[in-house]
Structure formats: C-alpha cells, structure tokens
Image (spheres, rainbow, N blue to C red):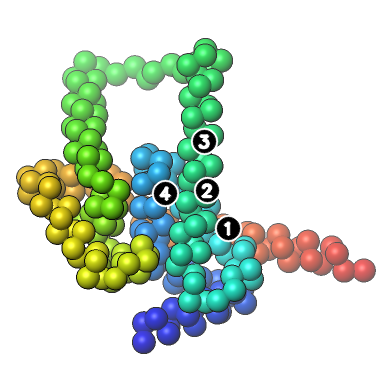
Amino acid sequence: MQREQEIDLVRKAKEGNIVAFAEIIRRYQNLVFATAFQILRDPALAEDVAQEAFVTAFQSMPALRTESSFPPWLRKITRNLALASRKEQRRFGALEEAGTLQSNPADAGPEAERMRREADAFGEEVRRIVSSLSDTLRFPVLLCHIHDLSTRDAARFLGITEGALRKRLHDGKKKLQERIVRMAEKSFQVYRLPPDFAKRCICGCRRSQAVEKRNGRKGVT
C-alpha cells in the first residue's frame, strides 16, 4: 500500500502538484542529504545540494518515464549535483592555495579556540573511524544509524534487498565497537537537516513553477 501511495504522489507531482511533492520531500530528505554528504563530507554543502536536488527533480518530473523508478532517479540527480559541487570546491580550494583568495579567521579567546580545536579533533576522529569502513558497509550505517532511516527505505534506495542491508549493518557494527558507534552518533547530530528544510525546498519549487508559468505566458502570441 505504501508503494502504491508513493507512486500516486509521484504521478501527482509530475502534474505540478506542490502538495504531493512536499510529501515526497519529507519522505526522501534524509536519504538525499545522506547521499550528498557521502560525497561532499560537509554538512552545509550537502544541505545546499539536497535542496538543489529536490528543486531540480521537481522541474524535471515530466521527464521521469515511470513513477516506480523515482527513487534511483532522484539519487542519480543528487549524486550528479554533489559530484559537480565537489569538483567546484576543489577548484576553489586550489585558488585559495595559490594565494588568489585570502580569508581572515575570526578572533576568538584562548578558551574558545581550545574548545574548537578539541571539537574539531573529536569530529575528525569519528569521521576517520566511520570512513575506515568499506563503502558497502559505511553507507548503510550512515543511513540507518546516523540519519534514522528504516531498513526498508534504505534498502530500496540502495537497490538491494532488506535482508542484504541488514547483513551489511551487522557486519558494519561488528567492525565498530559500541563505544565508537555511540560517539559517532553523537558527533553526527550536527549533520541532521534543519526542521524547515522541506519548507525551503517547497519555496524553491514554487518559485521555479512561477517562473515557468510566466515564461509560458510570455511565449503566447
């Protein structure tokens, strides 16, 4: 029944129904964010890409051939945008290293600076431990234990059976001590999407819809 409901939502969204697409955003926002974060490893950049992915998907809905293929189609959009963003960030970083761009660090007291360094080191250690897992094991752990996705939704998004996903989760948790997993979960709280994320995506979709309508009227003679 849930799959039939989702297909119906996708069908309505293809017709330009914002309300239906808003429900799609709420269902897939964590999956899309996790996909972007997997590539970018930066929560702010991943959030921007996730929002752009939903707006792009809404604009491109008429090109979707079958409603049932929406999840992998959305994932492909997200991956392409994230890869493009990573390429742009690397180019930007190269310019900074060459001295083309300069940035001035904000002044901070010694205690605040110490706490910042400790927090950075803690977060980096957690990311290092989680990143030590293979891609096959790391992504299911991120989806289910960091972003609180159900095994059914995560398995469908990855294109594998729920049984296969549970096996990967078991193997992943076996490689990570429980203390490390708890520390990682606490650290990655900062990487959750803000409560108004879906609302911002919907606003972007509405703007694109309004622009399309205006352009359509201009084209009428």
Please tell me which of labels 2 and 4 falls first in the chain: 4
Image point (19%, 38%), residue name? 129
Q: Which residue is mark 4?
A: 36
Q: Which residue is mark 1?
A: 56
Q: Which residue is mark 2?
A: 81
Q: Quarter of the image holding residue 14?
A: bottom right
Where residue 44 sits: x, y (%)?
Answer: 41, 41
Q: Which residue is mark 3?
A: 87
Please tell me which of labels 4 and 1 falls first in the chain: 4
Q: CA distance from mark 4 to mark 1?
A: 14 Å
Query: Quarter of the image containing the C terminus?
Result: bottom right
Badge 2 vs badge 4, beta-carbon distance below 8 Å: yes
Please tell me which of labels 3 and 4 falls first in the chain: 4
Callout 4 secondary element: helix
Image point (36%, 46%), residue name? 38
Badge 4 vs badge 1, beta-carbon distance below 8 Å: no
Q: Return the residue nearer the eye: 41 or 118.
A: 41
Callout 3 secondary element: helix
Number of callouts in the render?
4
Q: Quarter of the image holding residue 24?
A: bottom left
Q: Return the residue nearer the eye: 184 or 23.
A: 184
Please tell me which of labels 1 and 3 falls first in the chain: 1
Mark nearer the viewer, 2 or 1: 2
Badge 1 crowding class, 10 Å Cα cut-off, few under 14, some 14 to 19, many 20 or more, is: some
Badge 2 vs badge 1, beta-carbon distance below 8 Å: yes
Q: Amino acid at mark 3?
A: Lys
Q: CA distance from mark 3 to mark 2?
A: 10 Å
Task: Point out the residue furthest to the top here.
Answer: 99
Please tell me which of labels 2 and 1 falls first in the chain: 1
